[in-house]
Amino acid sequence: AVAGGFWQYGQEELLRPWAERYFTALPEIWASRGPAVALQITRLLYPQLDEPETLTLADGFLAAAEIPAGCRRVVLECRDETARALRAIAAS
């Protein structure tokens, strides 16, 4: 429940520093937890910041890290959601 409510719209200034921490923490999360828990944490805590910087952080993580396939899949899916949101914002 805490993870699901962490990213709140309208709180971008407060939450922005946590985006980088999220990507830094993912390898340890996947190394120290089972796949089901790691998948939930990865999905629920993905930065809900509809900003190009979120895509940059995700791209850097995906390019630099040797990560489990499940982690890569969830980050790619969440990255796609952010990219779609940015396209929608640009179109409106």
Image (cartoon, helix red, strand yellow):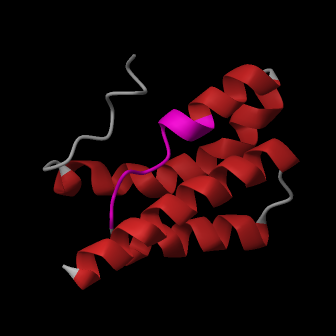
The secondary structure that dominates the magenta segment is loop
What is the magenta range? Answer: 42-50
Q: Position of residue 77 (x, y in %)?
A: 62, 55
Q: Position of residue 48 (x, y in %)?
A: 37, 51
Left/right placement of residue 55 relative to residue 76 reads left
Observer-nearest residue: 11 or 80?
80
Q: Is residue 68 visible?
A: no
Q: How many marks?
A: 0
Relative to 84, residue 17 above or below: above
Observer-nearest residue: 89 or 51?
89
Q: Is residue 13 magenta?
A: no
Q: Is residue 48 visible?
A: yes
Relative to 45, residue 61 above or below: below
Relative to 70, residue 85 above or below: below
> What residue is rendered at 48% in x and 57% in y?
20
Left/right placement of residue 79 relative to residue 67 reads left
Q: Quadrant of residue 49?
A: bottom left
> What residue is rendered at 75% in x and 73% in y?
63
Residue sitting at the far top: 1
Q: Position of residue 16 (x, y in %)?
A: 31, 57
> What residue is rendered at 55% in x and 64% in y?
80
Left/right placement of residue 74 relative to residue 87 reads right
Relative to 74, residue 91 above or below: below
> What residue is rendered at 49% in x and 34% in y?
44
Q: Position of residue 79 (x, y in %)?
A: 55, 62
Q: Quadrant of the N terminus?
A: top left
Q: Quadrant of the C terminus?
A: bottom left
